[in-house]
Amino acid sequence: MNENLEIVTHIYKDSEMSISSLKKLNTVLENKDNKIKNIIEEILQGYEEYFKKAKKILINGKGKKEKTGLITKVMANMGIDKEVKDDNSDSAIADLLIKGIMMGTVDLEKKIKKYEDVKLNEETKKIVEDFQSFQNSCIEKLRCFL
């Protein structure tokens, strides 16, 4: 797989995992009175947009649309259930989401660092920069709940 597609695949998988986790979180919070629910929905919509963009790039570049493994999703869902059961305050949920977003951010940085000597195409650069900006803005929105 070429470097551009590998980086876009990371965004695709990160977005797909985030969508799954945020949908699960929405379900868990459905009958609760959390103020953070609107922000969660906004973040979910953002990840859905990046998932679509990455998918389009992968299809056009004939890259594989690798999905996150079922075990990983089940473990994440179990973690969400446990964390929210222990503390469903907006602060605890914001902390959980910030940590999850930061894991994705760090993983993407590693990919970028791995290919720093490779000239990425403009489409890949754009989606990477936009995705990083999106993730940073999500963290900033969530910080007010800490």
Image (spheres, rainbow, N blue to C red):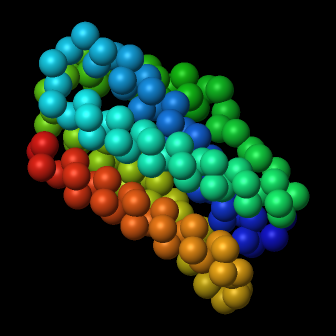
Asked which quadrant contains residue 42, the reply is: top left
Q: Residue at x 42, y 32 (%)?
A: 22
Most extreme residue toward the right, as rendered? 62
Asked which quadrant contains residue 8, the reply is: bottom right
57, above or below 74, in the image: below
Question: Which is nearer the eye, 135 or 83?
Answer: 135
> Along the horizontal axis of the image, is 40 left or right of 120?
left
Residue 136 percent across, percent down from the top left: 33, 62
91, above or below 26, in the image: below
Residue 106 percent across, percent down from the top left: 45, 62
Question: Which is nearer the eye, 120 or 112?
Answer: 120
86, above or below 4, in the image: above
> Along the horizontal axis of the image, is 48 left or right of 3?
left
> Along the horizontal axis of the image, is 122 left or right of 49?
right
Q: Residue at x 23, y 58 (%)?
A: 140
Question: Which is nearer the eye, 108 or 18?
Answer: 18
Quadrant where the N terminus lies?
bottom right
Residue 135 percent across, percent down from the top left: 39, 58
Residue 146 percent across, percent down from the top left: 12, 45
Can residue 29 be spotted in the picture? yes
Can residue 93 be spotted in the picture? no
Q: Residue at x 50, y 26 (%)?
A: 75
Q: Residue at x 55, y 69 (%)?
A: 128
